[in-house]
Image (cartoon, helix red, strand yellow):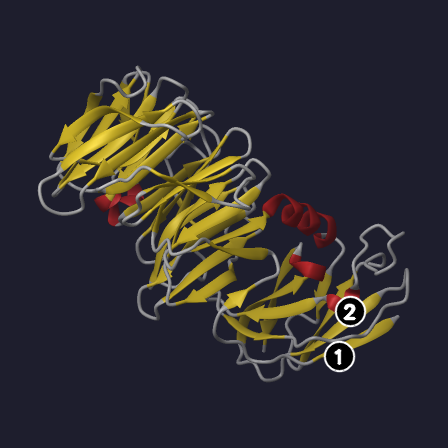
Amino acid sequence: MKYFIIFLVLFSNNYLSAEWKQVEIGELGIVYNLEFADPNYAFLTNYRGKGIYKSTDNGDNWNLINLNLSNEPVSLTFYKNYGWLGISPLSGSINSEIMFSSNYGENWEKINSFQGEIPIQMKAIDSNKLFLLAIKPNAYSIKYSIDRGLTWESIENGNSQVLGSFHYGNKFYWCGYSGNLKYFENGEIKAISSGILLEHNIYEVRFLNDNLGFVSCNKGKIFKTNNSGILWEDISNGIPSSFRINGLYFKDERNGWISGYDTIQNYSFVYSTIDGGLSWVEDLKFNNSKFYDFALSSNNKLWIRGNNSLLFYKDIETSIEKNNEFKDDLYVYPNPASDYIEISLPENMSSNPTLKHGVDVASLNVQIYNMLGLEVAQTPSFVNTVQSGASDLLIVDVSHLPAGVYHVRIIGSNGVWSIVEKFVKM
């Protein structure tokens, strides 16, 4: 058996784990929309943009399609090669337009217009059916089209603001202030907000199936339902109340991510969970920026958009596979701890490529988080190697930490996987 003694150092400033990659595209400013279409196409619009940006390799490279727009490209949606673009001025008299493309955004034509409304969000269900969220001062309208946007039917008009929308199957969800959460299906509208949700403003909604859904709210709150919205459970364990959560994505019941910005300390964040929200840890931090919602590409990369012309992405499929592979074989003890914790690594976690995991223990990184999800310490680089097939212990000094409950995160070589375990410091 080998022992690795690890000393932790305090952590501050930007944090970009090896799992996340940063992409900068010219001088975009705020990215309004990020859409992935079939099979490798991606599109985005930006503040004061003259057109749309297009990628044919799932976001690795981008080119501008200049449409000489005089107003803002505020909304965008694609279904395969069909695209719809909402254009509107952000001040003065509002005269919005809807444009349509049938060839992956290369050519566009005007197909409709709205007086006094901004088409802030659109979602294509197929090549003919679309939902649209239009807003005006202190009011909103949910519209539906079955003829590629040539005509629209209003299905609900309200006097408050809608903050987010989502499509799953035949259902179109929308959410907003004072617990407003509804969906439209087969010509009917149903409200599914109840109980504690009525006390919050809902920013984002996601459903994985008819029963399992998640919402993000003000004051850093995240709620989960397993019964189509009849009951909601608070899963915002340790999320600071100063967080504005703009993005919400769950791959399955256990693995999820949230994004947004701290309204007090002026930084953006991505937090992740691998246990369905029982614990959250900081996954990405960036100062003087704001993160918005997520988008998933066809090659299972999770993208996050923001201002400052920046995009970030990570391969979530590889990350989840590695998490599941290692988690059952890893132990943290003593627990509770006073001066140190020992992390028992799987026997076959080795740099030997013939072994199952093929992981270089010398490249592991250990991070400690408090119950607010803030990273309080991490390991510096260390270069010890491991004997093939031997059991190994990482001994981590935690004597300097105040008493409380913490999460320890072990990050693998090149950041392609991470495991989170809980311990108590006495």
Residue 251, image quadrant: top right
x and y percentages locating residue 393 in the rendered image: 79, 70
For residue 400, above or below residue 94 = below
367 relative to 153 in the view: left or right: right
Front-lying residue, 236 or 127: 127
Considering the numbered disc 2 on the image, is that residue within a helix, a strand or a loop?
helix
Q: Residues within 10 Å of mark 1 (few under 14, many from 20)?
A: few
Q: Residue at x 78, y 58 (%)?
A: 359
Considering the numbered disc 1 on the image, is that residue within a helix, a strand or a loop?
strand
Residue 113, image quadrant: top left
Quarter of the image where the N terminus is located: bottom right
Q: Residues within 10 Å of mark 2 (few under 14, many from 20)?
A: some
- Whichever of labels 1 and 2 marks the residue nearer the N terminus, that label is 1
Q: Across the whole image, how many numbered discs are drawn on residues?
A: 2
Front-lying residue, 65 or 237: 65
Q: Are the residues flagged by discs 1 and 2 in contact, CB closer than 8 Å?
A: no
For residue 119, above or below residue 414 = above
Q: CA distance from mark 1 to mark 2?
A: 12 Å
x and y percentages locating residue 180 in the rendered image: 25, 39
x and y percentages locating residue 394 in the rendered image: 75, 72
x and y percentages locating residue 202 in the rendered image: 30, 46
Front-lying residue, 320 or 300: 300
Residue 278 appears in view:
no
171 relative to 360 in the view: left or right: left
Q: Residue at x 86, y 64 (%)?
A: 391
What's the amino acid at mark 2?
Ala
What's the amino acid at mark 1?
Ile
* Residue at mark 1: 5
Q: Residue 362: which numbered mark, if any?
A: 2
Q: Residue at x 25, y 33 (%)?
A: 133
Quarter of the image where the C terminus is located: bottom right
Residue 353 appears in view:
yes
